[in-house]
Image (tube, rainbow, N blue to C red):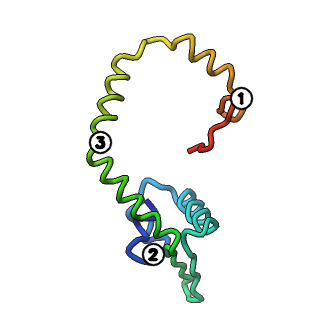
Amino acid sequence: MVIRCLETGPRRFTELRVPLPAITPKVLSGTLRAMERDGLLTRTPYDENPPRVEYALILLGRTLIPLLDTARVWSGTHLPQPLAARQDHEHDAPAAPCRMMAVCDSKRSPGTGSATSSPTACST
């Protein structure tokens, strides 16, 4: 969402808050710091009163825009299918949890939420 907000040019923090009202200032700030750390955007402070800071995508961040465009096209075409499958699954789900879930949960590492056998490469 931040990439989409910055694709048209630099924006101030308060300008980013307008299209992203569901994101708390703390989460947005952390996201911007992480994106700057990862080399996706720049943070430019201006020596003005009141202070002003702008965020802008750099080349590496801009390389994500075509991927977002592709994901948007895919979801526009295919999203009804997983939504229908989810609805069918929830409708057919048993009322009580199955025994297999208890077995799977007992094999999880304490505090990590991942199975002990092999952690996944992506945690998001």
Which amino acid type is marked by label 1?
Thr
Asked if residue 113 is positioned above or below residue 39 in the image, the reply reads above
Q: Which residue is mark 1?
A: 116
Q: Label 1: state its secondary structure.
A: loop
Q: Where residue 8 appears, x then y in whole percent?
A: 38, 74
Q: Earlier in the sequence, mark 2 or mark 1?
A: 2
Q: CA distance from mark 3 to mark 1?
A: 34 Å
The residue under label 2 is: 11
Mark 2–mark 1 Cα distance, whole angstroms, equals: 43 Å
- Element on which disc 2 rests: strand
> Are the residues tagged 3 and 1 within 8 Å (C-beta)?
no
Name the residue located 57 percent from the left edge and 63 percent from the top edge. Answer: 29
Q: Label 3, secondary structure: give it.
A: helix
Q: Residues within 10 Å of mark 2 (few under 14, many from 20)?
A: some
Name the side, left or right, on which 111 lies relative to 78: right
Residue reaching furthest to the bottom: 48
Q: Amino acid at mark 3?
A: His
Q: Position of residue 13 (x, y in %)?
A: 50, 71
| Residue 54, percent from left and from top | 51, 78
Look at 35% across and 16% down and name the residue there.
92
Q: Residues within 10 Å of mark 3 (few under 14, many from 20)?
A: few
Determine which residue is flagged by label 3. 78
At x 41%, y 71%, the residue is 7
Q: Which of the image's four quarters has the N terminus? A: bottom left
